[in-house]
Image: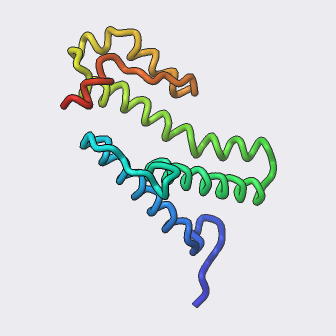
Amino acid sequence: MSVDMSRGSHPKNSLDLLRLVAATLVLYSHQHVLTGLAEPSFFGWNTFGGAGVTIFFFLSGLLVWSSWERDPDVRRFFIRRSLRIFPALWVVVLVSVFLLGPLLSNLSVPAYFSDSLSWRYLSTALLLVRNVLPGAQTSALSR
């Protein structure tokens, strides 16, 4: 029985295992922050979360480079990257503004939506990054 390695199939490699390890390191790091504990260093040079993020960036670079090598046309490459990144970004921005923001804000819902920061945050969907939603920064950590 042969394995079909045509377009759309999932090759057998160790990248999924490495991504699982990286995600576990990031989750381990986050539990320290959420419980207010100091995070131990990872082999004395980084935090566990930092090591996990570094692994993710390295793997992403490998995967993006292999995508470029398969088809080095700039226009098609940009379109493929955009279609992979922007829909998820748009969903995250919309969920952040219209669901998480009002839920985590220490402002009332009308006050949250009347604040211009709520609406300016939508520009993050166009890569004009905003890091603040009104009333949501400190209320999430104090609950």
As drawn, which residue projects farthest toward the front? 44
The answer to whether residue 111 is left or right of residue 3 is: left
Q: Residue at x 32, y 8 (%)?
A: 114
> Residue 137 at what x, y percent from top left?
33, 24
Residue 142 or 41: which is nearer the viewer? Answer: 41
Q: How many marks?
A: 0
Q: Residue at x 80, y 52 (%)?
A: 72
Residue 21 or 133: which is nearer the viewer? Answer: 21
Residue 37 or 11: which is nearer the viewer? Answer: 37
The answer to whether residue 117 is left or right of residue 75 is: left
Q: Is residue 23 above or below residue 138?
A: below
> Residue 128 at what x, y percent from top left?
56, 22
How is this picture coloured? rainbow
As drawn, which residue projects farthest toward the right? 73
Q: Is residue 78 above or below residue 108?
A: below
Residue 111 or 32: which is nearer the viewer? Answer: 32
Q: Quadrant of residue 110?
A: top left
Q: Residue at x 71, y 41 (%)?
A: 78
Which corner quadrant holds the N terminus?
A: bottom right
> Residue 85 at what x, y percent from top left?
57, 42
> Residue 31 at what x, y percent from top left?
30, 48
Q: Quadrant of residue 93?
A: top left
